[in-house]
Image: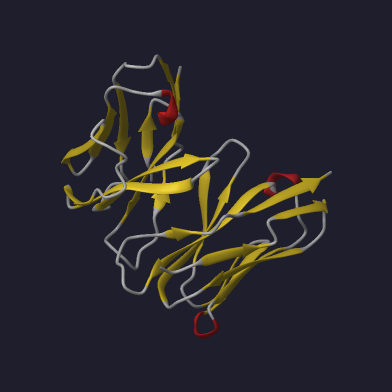
Amino acid sequence: DAGVIQSPRHEVTEMGQEVTLRCKPISGHNSLFWYRQTMMRGLELLIYFNNNVPIDDSGMPEDRFSAKMPNASFSTLKIQPSEPRDSAVYFCASSRQEGYYEQYFGPGTRLTVT
Amino acid sequence: GIQVEQSPPDLILQEGANSTLRCNFSDSVNNLQWFHQNPWGQLINLFYIPSGTKQNGRLSATTVATERYSLLYISSSQTTDSGVYFCAVEPGDSNYQLIWGAGTKLIIKP
């Protein structure tokens, strides 16, 4: 079975530009998570979807960040406008259902904002 | 909130050595996972182990939920075992949130 798929794997952009990160969860998983990893803060949960509905977006840093899940097989995380402090690795993860099932992570997108 | 502490923070070993990594947590949990983040940054699931013992090849893990700790054993270390090992727990009052330890950075020298 294919794992969680993320694209792009690397993104370099200039401050002020819009960035869109994409995720395809594992088929049959109905929970999806976006995380951000930095050296300073470690892994942070940004947003959690269950059955395509955002359940917890309290980790989204500010209004410049938005996430959507239009269907069970696709999600996007958008940053507009991007800032240098957004530079990080962004992971998408999925699990079969909320709680009690392990989360599987995608390969991540390394974002650099100059 | 729940605290997750991992030890040791760093570990350097020769190839072939055995190691034990520890994860302590401060409250009851629904779920505990061990991950390996390899030098390329990928997070790989090792174990889903809220309690009991599991083994997968050279790796095994034990969680004693009543005493609030988990151990990850790596036997006959290989250079490919290098990376950071994370413990992440789902608190008993949550049904999705993972709380992460700071990780143990393992370096296996040839």
The residue lying at 59 percent from left, 55 percent from top is B103
Q: Camera-side residue: A32 or A37?
A: A37
Query: In which quarter of the view is residue B71 placed?
Result: bottom right
Query: Residue A91, image x and y in percent?
Result: 41, 40
Query: In which quarter of the view is residue B30 placed?
Result: bottom left
Left or right: residue A43 compared with residue A34: right
Left or right: residue A97 compared with residue B89: left
Left or right: residue B7 compared with residue A101: right
Residue B46 to residue A41: above or below: below
Does the image show residue B62? Answer: no
The residue lying at 47 percent from left, 41 percent from top is A37
Q: Camera-side residue: A88 or A28?
A: A88
Residue occupying the far bottom of the picture: B66
Query: Residue A33, image x and y in percent?
Result: 32, 48
Query: Residue A48, image x and y in percent?
Result: 27, 50
The residue lying at 43 percent from left, 29 percent from top is A85
Query: Residue A9, image x and y in percent?
Result: 44, 27
Does the image show residue A61? Answer: yes
